[in-house]
């Protein structure tokens, strides 16, 4: 699964730690998401999309291998 998390976070001028606090996860979880090592739960994806005011599909995208 690809994502635009790092880009959206930079646009919003948020650190990984700040975003993590807003969605109630660890900074390491945000880092793993950005590196594509972790696929978020539906609840986490929805929380992240709310922080940025975007749809889940604008932030996360399925790849052919998914």
Image (cartoon, helix red, strand yellow):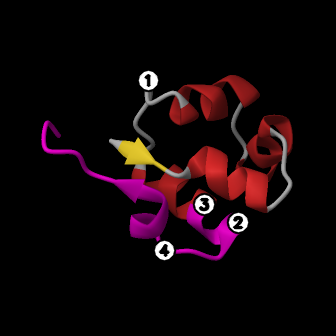
Assess disc 2: are there few (<14), some (14-19) or many (≥20) residues with their C-alpha within 10 Å of its C-alpha: some
Q: Label 2 to label 3, Cα distance in Å? A: 6 Å
**Tag shown at residue 47:** 3
**Residue 21: % across, % down:** 82, 44
**Mark 2 in CB contact with mark 3 (< 8 angstroms):** yes
**Residue 32: % across, % down:** 55, 26
**Mark 3 in CB contact with mark 4 (< 8 angstroms):** no
- When asked about the image quadrant of residue 49, the answer is bottom right
For label 2, the residue is 51
Nearer to me, 57 or 22: 57
Element assignment for label 1? loop
State left or right for residue 1 relative to residue 29: left
**Mark 1 in CB contact with mark 3 (< 8 angstroms):** no
**Residue 39: % across, % down:** 40, 37
Element assignment for label 3? helix
- When asked about the image quadrant of residue 58, the answer is bottom left
As drawn, which residue projects farthest toward the left?
Answer: 64
Task: Give me the residue at 48% from left, 74% from top.
Answer: 55
Task: Give me the residue at 83% from left, 36% from top.
Answer: 17
For label 4, the residue is 55
32 in relation to 56, above or below: above
For label 1, the residue is 37
Assess disc 1: are there few (<14), some (14-19) or many (≥20) residues with their C-alpha within 10 Å of its C-alpha: few
The numbered mark, 3 or 4, whose residue comes first in the sequence reads 3
The numbered mark, 1 or 3, whose residue comes first in the sequence reads 1
Nearer to me, 24 or 51: 51
61 within the magenta span: yes
Q: Label 3 to label 4, Cα distance in Å? A: 10 Å
State left or right for residue 46 relative to residue 19: left
| Magenta extent | 49-66
The N terminus, quarter of image: top left
């Amino acid at each position: 699964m690809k994502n635009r998390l790092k880009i959206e976070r930079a646009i919003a001028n948020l650190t990984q730690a700040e975003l993590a606090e807003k969605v109630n996860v660890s900074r390491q979880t945000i880092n793993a998401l950005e590196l594509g090592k972790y696929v978020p739960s539906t609840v986490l994806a929805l929380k992240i999309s709310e922080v940025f005011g975007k749809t889940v599909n604008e932030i996360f995208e399925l790849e052919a291998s998914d």
